[in-house]
Every structure is written in structure tokens, then in C-alpha cells.
Image (tube, rainbow, N blue to C red):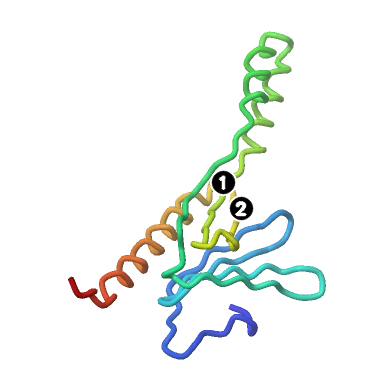
Amino acid sequence: MSDQATLLEDEKYISSVVGKNGNKKTTITLTNLRIFQETKVSGGQEVNYIPLGNIDSYGIGTSQHFLILLLGIVLLPLYGLGIVFIIAYWITRKTGLLVHSNSGKTTLVIEASSSNRKELTKFTDEIQSMISQKLMVLPLLPT
């Protein structure tokens, strides 16, 4: 973690995942109070925070270019040209984690390689666990 994203009083580090946001190195860190993204930008660093209670949704997505795969399959009989397209399909796949705030104004995004999907899945499980723990300690409203 960087100096800019110092932990608050009573805040405990849970986990983090490292990847890219475009061509910039980025880290998303989960604590017992919030989730935040640190992105290295030219001349400094950008940090965005979402308190755990303000997380609207989160998930893992994979972008795939099926047209490239289809071209590869169609062109396979032509001197193996299709193999180039099939390889390009696997190289251009992107897997990423998205975390959205309730207001919709803040979205944390991190791209990872397809081989990093297990780490992203574990991280989303940790987010769910922390949100569940937060919900269990909320005071009950009178009925």
C-alpha cells in the first residue's frame, strides 16, 4: 500500500489484487471498512474509495472477441491462416474486476490476465465476506 492510502484508525487490511487499468498499474485493496483503488498516473497516483456499506455491485467479467474466433474457424482450411486468428482470440481476451458504488459515481476497475481469474474470484469472495460481516453488525431498526 502507498503512503496516500494510509489506513484509518481501527481499519484492518484484508486483501488486495494487482493488475492494470488501461496501461496503468493499479491495485484494489480491501479493508474491514472500505475498498479502494490506487492507480499510478504520470507524476503521481490516483486513489478512489468506496465504503463497504456503499458498494452496490461487484463482479468479474471477461471480454471476448468472438468475431476473431469465428474468422479463425472459417479460415482454418486456408493454409492454416485460421490458426493465427484463433491465437489472436486467446491473446486478446481480458478478464477484470468491477466494483460499483451506490451512487454510480465511482467504479473501481482492474484488468487481469485470464490466468489471474482464480485470484479475482477469491478477492470477490473476500468482498462478500466483509459485506456480510458488516450487515450482521448493523443495528436492528425498531418494528
Q: Amino acid at mark 2?
A: Glu
The quarter of the displayed image where residue 12 is located: bottom left
Measured as percent of width and height from the top left, residue 48 is found at: 61, 70
**Residue 95, disc:** 1
Residue drawn at (53%, 54%) of the image: 97
Q: Camera-side residue: 118 or 48?
A: 48
Which residue of the protein is positioned furthest toward the top in this rendering? Answer: 77
Looking at this rendering, what residue extends furthest in the right direction? 43
Q: Is residue 51 above or below residue 117?
A: below
Residue at x 69% of width, y 31% of height: 88
Q: Residues within 10 Å of mark 1 (few under 14, many from 20)?
A: some
Residue furthest to the bottom in view is: 9
Whether residue 90 sits left or right of residue 12 in the image: it is right
| Residue tagged 2 | 111
Which residue is at 60% across, 57% downward?
109
Residue pictured at 52% horizontal, 84% vertical: 7
**Three-letter code for the amino acid on which mark 1 is drawn:** Thr
Which mark sits nearer the N-terminus, 1 or 2?
1
